[in-house]
Image (cartoon, rainbow, N blue to C red):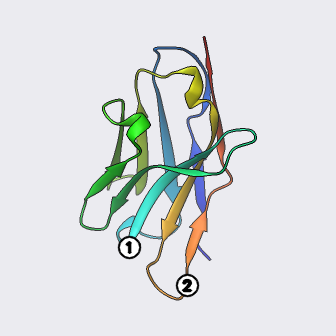
Amino acid sequence: QVQLVESGGGLVQAGGSLRLSCAASGRIFSFNAMGWYRQAPGKQRELVAGITRSGSTNYADSVKGRFAIFRDVTKNTVNLQMNGLKPEDTAVYYCNADTGSRLGEYWGQGTQVTVSS
C-alpha cells in the first residue's frame, strides 16, 4: 500500500509563495506520473500540475508561469512551488500518484492552502 503525505500548506497573503511537498512511501520513479490536484469549496477537484516518470510536466492554464512542479530525488518527494498566489488559489491541495497499471492511483490526505486578499 502506497502512502502519500503532503506538507507545506498554510495561510499566505496574495502575492506570496508556498512550497508543497509530497512524500511517497514508494520510489517516486516507480509511478507512471505524479501530480498535484486541488479542490475548492463547492468545486470539482482539478489538476494543477503533473509530472511524468520521464520528467515531462503539464500545468493548468490558471497556474502557468506561477507554479512549478519538480522532484527531489534525494528526499523522494514531489514538490509544488507556488509563487504569485492569488485568493482564487485557495483550496485543499492533494498529491496523486498514478501507477499506470491495474494498481490504479493513490491520493494523499490533502493540505489546506489559503490565500488572503
Image quadrant in which the C terminus is located: top right
Q: Residue at x 43, y 79 (%)?
A: 100
Looking at the image, which residue is at 40% across and 57% down?
76
Q: Where is residue 90? Give x, y as percent.
A: 62, 30
Measured as percent of width and height from the top left, residue 83 is found at 40, 25
Q: Is residue 45 above or below residue 32?
A: above
Residue 63, percent across and down?
41, 35
What kind of residue is marked 2?
A: Leu
Q: Which residue is mark 2?
A: 103
Nearer to the camera, 44 or 112: 44
Q: Secondary structure at mark 1?
A: loop
Q: Which mark, residue 32?
A: 1
Is 41 displayed left or right of 98 in the figure?
A: right
The amino acid on which the numbered mark 1 sits, given as a three-letter code, is Asn
Q: Secondary structure at mark 2?
A: loop
Q: What separation in Å lies between label 2 and label 1 (alpha carbons)?
A: 11 Å
Mark earlier in primary sequence (2, 1): 1
Question: As drawn, is 75 to the left or to the right of 93?
Answer: left
Q: Is residue 28 left or right of residue 9?
A: left
Residue at the far bottom in the pictured view? 102
Residue 66 vertical position relative to residue 103 in the rendered view, above or below: above
Q: Is residue 64 above or below residue 6?
A: above
Q: Which quadrant of the figure has residue 4?
A: bottom right
Residue 36 sits above or below residue 103 on the image: above
Q: Total of numbered circles in the picture?
A: 2
| Residue 30 placement: quadrant | bottom left
Quick one: quadrant of the N terminus?
bottom right
Q: Residues within 10 Å of mark 1 (few under 14, many from 20)?
A: some
Image x and y of residue 112, in percent? 66, 36
Q: Residue at x 66, y 48 (%)?
A: 110
